[in-house]
Image (cartoon, rainbow, N blue to C red):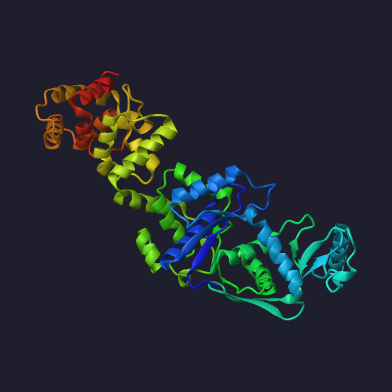
Amino acid sequence: MSTEVVTRFAPSPTGFLHIGGARTALFNWLFARHHGGKFLLRIEDTDVARSTPEATAAILDGMTWLGLDHDGEAVSQMSRVDAHRAAVDAMLARGTAYRCYATKEEIDAAREAAKAAKLPPKFSSPWRDVDPADAPADTPFTVRLKAPREGETTVEDAVQGRVAWGNDQLDDLIMLRSDGTPTYMLAVVVDDYDMGVTHVIRGDDHLTNAARQTLIYQALGYETPIFAHIPLIHGPDGAKLSKRHGALGVGEYREMGYLPEAMRNYLVRLGWSHGDDEFFTDEQATQWFSLEGVNKSAARFDFAKLENLNGQHIRVADDARLTQITAQRLQTRDGITLTAAQHTALTEAMPGLKERAKTINELVDLGYYIYAQRPMNLDEKALKQLTDENRTMLRDLTSQMQNATAWQPDALEQIVKDFAAGKELKLGKVAQPLRAALTGRAVSPSIYDVMITLGKEETVLRLQDQSQA
């Protein structure tokens, strides 16, 4: 086995990239990058009936969005069937596998009899020790692993510790079906070995598979990789994460407005920790990540924590990049394309916008005033600010704005302060209706920055729209 660390992510293309799968991919990616090794991608598409090109595309798209780059081309497991069959031939030659001619009916009957006798419902093939020369001709057969019947199989797991299974609990797994197609258990072992995988990092629901696959490694004479079975993700209530808890697919989180770096930050903290650190960069995660930091117990998905963390990443993100992401979301979500001037205005306003947003979708909404067309659509909270009394007040303020000679934040702030003082009103009693009229929202960056972004003409026109409504 190579001394270079090699990890892999091996999803089945039967649907979207699940958030749990994304976390598994992330752990493999970080471990490989931490050690300067390789992170490989294998699409386990041998289940032809359920695998689809669309699902493969969705997985690749999710990986790309998350920024989990893999080394080399993605490998299709289906393209390696000849290697799987060759491995079975090698096992037959070594005497660690055998051809089984038992019919489905015979197998079902044997399992029912074991069940009735309150024994484990495993099948003991009568063909296990039959001389191959005595095999019936022209009869369909499967190829089974000749698993040990006594003793135990142990796995020294990098996360779970030493785990042992009595060999009397492990049956002779089918390696090759009667139609000549390899089974999942065999294909995984052969592929991992041929791809030089040194560390198999996956969910702990695969822990029992590690015992079975260890026997296959031994039957082939292969060195066993290091297994690391990480805890599953549960919902806030402690139950296994499901649709009722919220979004499951990575693509859904992108649509909800989360940044990929925030998702990476949050997902790596699900089942792994580095002291009390919560917010950190990719560079820090890569430097710190180790299997020793992985917990044994299940992690609970907390949407509030994810949103808070996303807000932190938005605040430190590059303004031009955030503008580009926000513009793309506006296009895909609402079908609105920003003009060059609006794009520039959004970039200039971004420092104020991102201080108040926890998601990209909130950035889109907070930036509404920049791309809004008159007359604007005011949200419910903004409409509550525009009472008849406040509309009358805005009419008086509009005339002062029309006469403003210096269109600068300090000068505009002074105009509003003087106006409020003249009306014997607190500043907020003027600023809130003013914000509602100019942005259509109850929350925005500094109202004086908003007026600078809009310019004098647009500011006055919007005030006139609302003060005369």
Q: Does any portion of residue 271 appear in the rendered image?
A: yes
How far across and how far down the image is residue 441, in percent?
A: 32, 33
Question: Where 462 falls versus 318 (above or below)?
Answer: above
Q: Position of residue 376 (x, y in %)?
A: 33, 25
Q: Specify whether 363 is left or right of 178.
A: left
**Quarter of image, res 415:** top left
Residue name at image x 70 percent, y 47 percent: 49
Is residue 279 visible to us here? Answer: no
Taking the view exactly as shown, the residue that stands out farthest to the bottom is: 151
Q: Quadrant of residue 457?
A: top left
Instruction: State whether residue 267 is above or below residue 50.
Output: below
Residue 162 vertical placement versus 110 (above, below):
below
Q: Nearer the viewer, residue 303 or 396?
A: 303
Q: Residue 409: image x %, image y %?
A: 15, 36
Taking the image as shown, residue 30 lies to the left or right of residue 220, namely left
* Quadrant in the rendering for residue 143: bottom right
Left or right of 381? Residue 154 is right
Residue at (51% x, 64% y) in the render: 7
In the image, 260 versus 100, the foreground residue is 100
Could you tell me residue 404's position as x and y percent? 11, 26
Q: Quadrant of the N terminus?
A: bottom right
Q: Nearer the viewer, residue 194 or 284?
A: 194
User: Measuring 45% from the left and 69% from the top, which residue is drawn there?
Assistant: 290
Q: Nearer the viewer, residue 111 or 439?
A: 111
